[in-house]
Amino acid sequence: MKKLFSILKYGLLLGVSAFLMWYALKELDFEKMWAELQNANYGWVGLSLLMGVAAYLSRAYRWQMQIKPTGYQPSLQNTYNAMMVGYIANLVLPRMGEVVRCSMLRRSDGIPVNKGFGTVIAERFVDMLMLLLAVAITFLSEFRQIKDFFWELLSSKYSNLEQAIDSLYWVAGFFLVSVIVLVLVGLRYLSRLRENSFFQKAVQFVKGMLQGVFSITKLDNQAVFWGILFLCG
């Protein structure tokens, strides 16, 4: 029965993958693609492939560095494989790959999903900081053009902007009130919640995830980590 279930599971995944591949390529002109391939400069193609592999390997090594402070030491090969499977999963459902790659490391190295996911959160946070830094540099270097663009945009849509801001105030107020109510209810029933098995599991999950998040502050070599980040992303 277990073998039959595995066959059905992988058969279903293969079928879904084949359908999605067909759907993505059904309008592709293969004759034109073949003509372009014949005229391509494969020296540049090979160089771009090498640079791509180097970038992925550097990201896998960076993730491996983040995982180490949590008490686990996956091999670079397992980390790389898990990350690439996660990228493939993102083609099926965006952001599903973040969970999938953590599940892969749980199977190969016994790393709890919550700790692995915590390192992914930290990784995404650092990536966002780098993106904001790049945006800030661009903004400063092209300040006059960007200022003129937004000035014209806001001037032409000032009335709509006022309405949008009013709506935003209502949404923010509702969100704030909801958070306050949830906190008050949680504090009132905190003693009961502590006795609840589901709540205890949730707390342990969050603790493990936070350990993964803050692993970035306990790296063995901060210089190498940030150097890889700046050079390879």
Image (cartoon, rainbow, N blue to C red):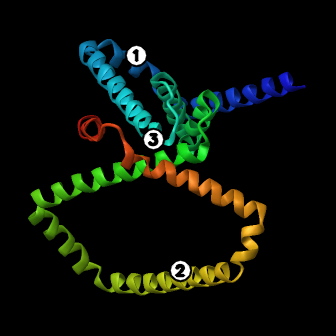
First of labels 2, 1 by sequence position? 1
Q: Which residue is mark 2?
A: 175
Tell me whether the residue at label 3 lies in contact with that at label 2, contact meaning CB atoms closer than 8 angstroms. no
Give the amino acid at mark 1.
Trp
Of circles 3 and 1, the one toward us is 3
Disc nearer the start of the sequence (3/1): 1
User: How many residues crowd mark 3 within 10 Å: few (<14), some (14–19), many (20+)?
Assistant: some
Image spot of residue 131 (x, y percent): 29, 52
Quadrant of the image occupied by residue 45: top left
Q: Earlier in the sequence, mark 3 or mark 2?
A: 3
Q: Are marks 2 and 1 in contact (CB under 8 Å)?
A: no
Q: Which residue is mark 3?
A: 69
Mark 2 lies on a secondary structure that is helix
Could you tell me residue 150's position as x and y percent?
A: 21, 71
The residue that mark 1 highlights is 34
Mark 2 neighbour class, 10 Å CA radius: few under 14, some 14 to 19, many 20 or more: few
In the rendered view, would you say 95 is above or below 27? Answer: below
Between the residue at mark 3 and the residue at mark 2, the CA separation in whole angstroms equals: 36 Å
Which element is circle 1 on? helix
Residue drawn 38% across the image and 83% down it: 165
Position of residue 222 measured from the top left corner of the image (x, y, whole percent) = 29, 41
Quadrant where the N terminus sits is top right
Q: Residues within 10 Å of mark 1 (few under 14, many from 20)?
A: few
Query: Quick one: quadrant of the C terminus?
Result: top left
Q: CA–CA distance between discs 3 and 1?
A: 48 Å
Name which residue lies at 59% across and 48% down.
114
